[in-house]
Every structure is written in structure tokens, then in C-alpha cells.
Amino acid sequence: MSLLQPKTLKPMSTSEAVAYAVKQTNVDVIAAYPITPQTIIVERLSEYVNNGELDAEYVAVESEHSAMSACVAASLTGARVFTSTASQGLALMHEVLYIASSLRCPIVMAIANRALSAPINIHCDHSDVMGSRDAGWVHIFVENGQQAYDRIFQAFRLAEDEDILLPVGVNIDGFFLSHAVEGIATISDNEAAMFLPPRRTKYYVDSSMPMTFGAFALPDWYFEIKEQVASAIEKVPKKLAEVEKTYYQMTGRMYGHVGAYKTEDAEVGLVCAGSAAATAKFAISRLREKGIKAGLLSIRLFRPFPVESILPHVKGMKALVVMDRAMSPGAPSAPIGQDIKTMLYDAGINIPVANFVYGLGGRDISAAEFESIILKMVEDLRSGRPIERGVRYWGLRS
Amino acid sequence: MEVRFHGRGGQGVVTAARLLAEACLLENKYSLSFPEFGPERSGAPVRAYVRISEEPIEVRSLVYDPEIVVSIDPRISSSTEILMGLDEEGTVVINSKNVSDSLLKAISSKPRVKLFYLDARGIALSLGDARFENSAMLGAVAKATGVVSLGSLESVLKTRFKGTVLENNLKAMQLGYDKVGQA
């Protein structure tokens, strides 16, 4: 990965970086609810539109339910559409999320991942997106502001591909990323336009060429239409790899479906998503200095779950630790734990998986904590102690 | 290098951290600044952090063992809470006319810690507005720690402010740089 000199980077919060990227995509319509739990993202975009820097329709709606409804309608006209939300806002959009994917609307949404009430919280966790994970959206997690900026362009190109035509969520950890300022390498407006030409689509609302969108489908066809969504999302890993390759040729930056670090000879693999994966990477580099064979698998593409990209790294590992920043109360595993265990079972790999829920409601997790989690697993393996199955909680007050 | 800022909502604590991080970028160092996360409420205690490194920054957790602690609020400056987790060879820069006995006592267990103080509020008020005290404190941080040059901080201020607001912030920063004293 090519590294730019820090002095050439632009200081931006991740929210500002996302807004700047969206401006450079020449988005046509932004519909958003501009009040809490919103972020700086739509505030900046409204300024860009107001200042005449961005020629887009900015629709300030009265709720997130309306925001997503407006996005669906706008997207069906063939427009390039963006919105952003977090926590309660994503929950309020819930029923329209399914409509967006089933009507094949390539909307891009930045989600500043935050806890769901109650208690009222506002801080980071992944409860919001995990509650929406079966809605037929592509979901990408990012570890820093640079990834967030780059993924916005990739998300539009992927979403608007006629083989895909699905909405994409770019998930940025609330506060840990959304409010953190760092140097961001940007592309020029020209490069953005080359990478992402105006959207072209075959089917759109046009009075000279009448078509029906959102039609009724009873038991005779409903099932087939839903299966088409599932079949389209299965094409995402291959398509995203192509999109990333093109982006890499322009920028020298590429992230992949999974961020693997030191997995080649790792005995214990740590699976994680979002900003904590970056902290975990540092923890693993420290463990490696002590001779501990640990590796990291950062889930960057979460839906579809990139089984083919993860499996080669897992083969040869003796155990996995899966860290989930969301609960699935009553389920045998937390969300990412469920996916990992299903993947292992299907591949015929029977290794112990420790599944921890951590960091709910913004509780921090440090590099030292990651180190101790991995060290405990290494010791358990060496001493032959059985690995506790089921969900455990990390960092819970006693 | 990790820095922790203490202060209250409305005193420009988060802005000070951001300005420091931006100045470090200008000096070709990687930096990351972030607030301790909450709805900004006027008057409530606020913390903000900066990480500075020659290498790209991975760690995204809060800062637990800062090398530098800065207190922008005069009352928080007398609290020993600001020393929490401070590196054995760390530096403390507080906004205060003098150093409280309790702080001196607490710091005596870490003999290599350096303590600096500045009457940033006095400087800010002499320029007509208490809101200049964060700029005065940044000037003091530049002198006391050498983590960043005054020139880089001035360059960052010039990208953000204009006119008399810029002039007064630059003056406050220079005065902070000139007047900071070691306890």
C-alpha cells in the first residue's frame, strides 16, 4: 500500500471525509433527517448545496422513514442518491430498507454505528446495523477515515452496476471514527468523475416510457423476486474486487473483503469489524514481538459475508476469537459469531470459537485488552483447557 | 506520543486538540484527534485526545497513558484527576496563575514529570475574550513540550480564522508561548 506524506493529507473528521467524497460523486439527491441522531455528514452536504458547490437536490425530511422513502423514489428516477443516519434513525428506516433493496435502488448510505435505546445512549456499537442485516443491503465496515472516504466512491460504483443494483451501507463507528480527525488522502474531482461517471440505468420512472415499480406480488411471484435480491448480492464479492482493482490503479489503495494481518502462520485468529479492528491490529503486532502466533481478520465486507475470502486464512488455525459489538439476545452466538461458525461448519473445520460481545454503548476496548483476550486463548490451547462455547461478555462491570 | 486535553464544554478543548493534530500534519507527522465522545454541553467537563506518530496510526481506543496532559480550565487545573495515567516522564501544562499544593503533592511521586503553568485566562481577558485561552494554552504547549512548533500552530490558525479574531488568537498564542513558566 502506498503511503503519502502526512503533510500532503487533508485534516478531516471521518464525517467530513464522507461528505467530501459524496460531494465529489456529483450525487443528484440527498434526503436526510437533519436532527439527532444525525452526524456532520449531512450538515456539510447541506452547506455544499447551499453554497452552490454541489448541484444536488437536498431534501430535509421530517423523519428517517421519510428520508429512506424519498431516497427510494429518487433512486427509481435513475438519480444518484445518498443519505446518512445512525442508531434510532436506521431503526426507523427499517421497513423501507427492504423496499430499497427489493426495488433494486442503488442508494448509498453512511451509517455512523451507534447504540439503540433504551437506555438512551448515542455512543458507538453495531446494534443498529446488525438489526438491519437481513434487509438485502450490501454492508461495508471501515476502520479509519481514509477507508470511509475511499469506500464511498467504491460503494456507488458497486451499487449502480447493472448486475448488482442494490443499496450499500458504509458503516463508520460512531464517535470513534465519525468525530475523529486525521489526515485524509483525497482524489481530484476529475479522478472522481473518471472513476464514477453519471449513473446510467435501463429502467427508471419516465412518463414517455411508462413502467410499474413497487407492484403487488402474491404467492405466485413474491418468492422469486426476493430470491433475485439474494442472487444479486451473491455477485458482490467478485464485482467489488473489480471495483477495488480499478480504484487501486488510480490511488494505490486497496482494502479487500477481509483485512488479514499476520494470518499465514497464526495459531489463533481474531475476528473483528470496524475501528476496533485497527486497535486489534496493533495488539497483534505487539503479541508477535513476544512470539505469540496471532493473526487478525477484519470483516470489511459484511454482507454478503465473504466466506471465500476468509476461509483460506482460517485453514491451519487452531482457534478463533470472534469479537461482536452487538448482541443477539437468546441466539447461540452473537451476529458475526453466527456467520463465522456457519462458515466453519460448512467448510468442515471444527476448531473452537470463543465469541465475545464487547463495547456496547461506546465502552472502549484497548490494545492491551485485545492482547489479554488472545493470550488467554493461547494459554487455554496450550494447557488443553476446553474453550467455553456460547456467548461471553468482555469488559462487563461485575 | 499521546496527549490528553481537559476542560469544559465551550472552552475550545476539542478545537485545541484538533489544531494541535493539524499542526503536526503540517510537520509531516501522522496525527489523530478525537473528543471524548458525548454531546457537547456548555460547562460540562470535556476531554479530547491527540495521537502523534512518525508511522500511520492504528490504535483507535481512548488514551490511557498520555505523555502530555493539558488543562484548559483553571478549576480543573487544580484537580489531581488530570494526572491519571500520566507517563513517568510526562509533561503537564495547566491554565492557572499558580500551582495548587494538592497537585504538587500528587506529582511528587513522579519526580521526572515536568509541570508548567500559564495564566491563560488572564491573557485571554486582556485581549477582551475568555475564548482566546485555548490558543494561549496551545502556545504554552509548544514551548513546554516542543511537540510542535509555534509556526505550525500559527499556520493552522490562519487557515481557520480571519481578521481581528485571527489577530487576537495569534497574540494569545504568542503570549502563551512567551509567558509559560515551569513549576
Image (cartoon, coloured by chain):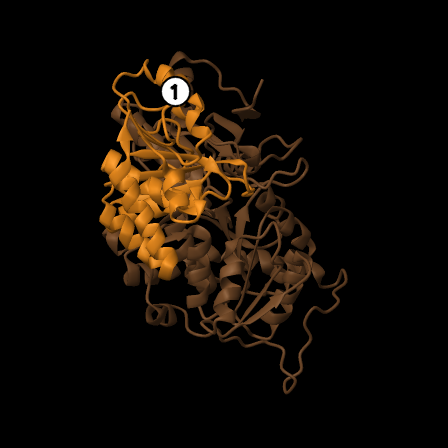
Chain depicted in brown: A
Residue A108 position, x and y percent, is: 52, 60
What chain is the orange one? B
Give left or right: position of A87 versus B124: right
The answer to whether residue A244 of the structure is visible from this angle is no
List the residue tagged with mark 1: B103
Q: Which residue lies at the image location 45% right of the left edge and 75% below the top edge?
A: A198
In the rendered image, the vertical position of residue A11 relative to residue A249, given as above or below:
above
Above or below, B85 relative to A333: above
Which quarter of the figure has residue A151? bottom left
Query: Nearest the camera: A2 or B163?
Result: B163
Foreground of the two, A225 or A180 = A180
Q: Position of residue A226 (x, y in %)?
A: 65, 58
Farthest residue in the bottom direction?
A208
Q: What kind of residue is marked 1?
A: Leu
User: Which of these two is toward me, A383 or A200?
Assistant: A200
Residue depicted at x 30% and y 31%: A285
> What secondary structure is marked by label 1?
helix
